[in-house]
Amino acid sequence: MRFLSFFCWTLALPAFAQFNGMSASGNGSSATVTISMSSNTVTVPCVTGAPYSGTQTSQSIQTLADGTRITRPATPRETTRRDSAGRVRTERELFPARPGAPQSSFMIVKVQDPVAGYAYLLDSVNQVAHRTAIKSMAATGPFNPPQQVGSRTLPDGTVSVTESLGEQIMFGVTAIGTKTTMTHPAGSRMGNDRPVTTTSELWWSPQLREMVMSINTSPEGNVSTMSMSDLSTAEPDAALFQIPASYKVVDESGSFTFTVALTK
């Protein structure tokens, strides 16, 4: 029995917040996917006039005391496409293959259509489109990175300092970077007997209103990186945001499950 649990799958898809979580269990030949949902209609941000396509990849590298480096994928690859009207399609592999251990796979597809007022989770095996209602909120106003430059002290004594990294061209778009260093006093983080630091480097694209890279380091020697690849600002194919005519549309108002056969 293999078990995967995905929570807050929202980095590239904040508009799918109505899907509170997703878990899946499988035995190599089939998988049962459980979607946890809000029973209320959710208002989601809608970015218009900024089409793009890209694949989000993540990995974690841990460096041991003797210099040994251990590299492992942090999350499955995730491909996102957004059109000028703000429609978003995201594809993510469930049960991704791991090096040296072939596994079965299944692609989870989510489509958000703020124009029609619905979000869909597509079950391509059973040809069912699970539909939920959404309300869209236009993302307007000037772009501001989520972390403001400056310093502050948290209640536990942790000192947080955020600095600007300026602008860079990343993956073909302009990105604004910030770096936050947090100094945790003794006893505030997992029993540390002296101060330790963590850092978070974020790069945001004003054009896309999306994060294109993040680098997080921990005192344990872990460096976690998320980056975009195959980034394009061309208008995606409109057919990607349409529900195939052969699919049965099922309206959902709460959590639901579906079972799929896995392919090698």
Image (cartoon, rainbow, N blue to C red):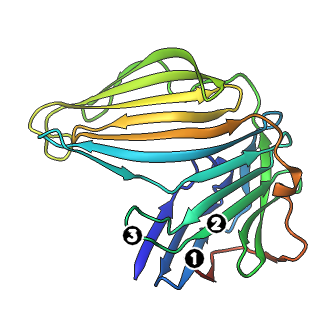
Please tell me which residue lies in front, 255 or 48: 48
Q: Earlier in the sequence, mark 2 or mark 1?
A: 1
- Determine which quarter of the picture holds residue 157: top left
Kind of residue sitting beneath label 1: Val
At which x and y percent is residue 161?
36, 21
Element carrying mark 3? loop
User: Relative to 242, is 197 above or below?
Assistant: above
Q: Is residue 92 left or right of residue 198?
A: right
Calculate the distance from the C-alpha at mark 1 to the C-alpha at mark 3: 22 Å
- The residue at the point 77 percent across, 78 percent down is 127
Q: Which residue is mark 2?
A: 108
Mark in the foreground, 2 or 3: 3
Mark in the foreground, 1 or 3: 3
Callout 1 environment at 10 Å: few (<14), some (14 to 19), or many (20+)? many
Callout 3 environment at 10 Å: few (<14), some (14 to 19), or many (20+)? few
Question: Where, quadrant-wise, is the C terminus in this rendering?
Answer: bottom right
Q: Earlier in the sequence, mark 2 or mark 3?
A: 3
Q: Is residue 50 left or right of residue 223?
A: right
Q: Earlier in the sequence, mark 1 or mark 3?
A: 1
Pointer 2 and pointer 1: residues touching (CB < 8 Å)? yes
Kind of residue sitting beneath label 2: Ile
Q: Which mark is residue 101?
A: 3
Element carrying mark 1? strand
Going by the picture, which residue comes out furthest to the left?
193
Pointer 1 and pointer 3: residues touching (CB < 8 Å)? no
Calculate the distance from the C-alpha at mark 2 to the C-alpha at mark 3: 21 Å
Q: Which mark is residue 33?
A: 1
Mark in the foreground, 2 or 1: 2
Does the image show residue 37? no
Does the image show residue 114? yes
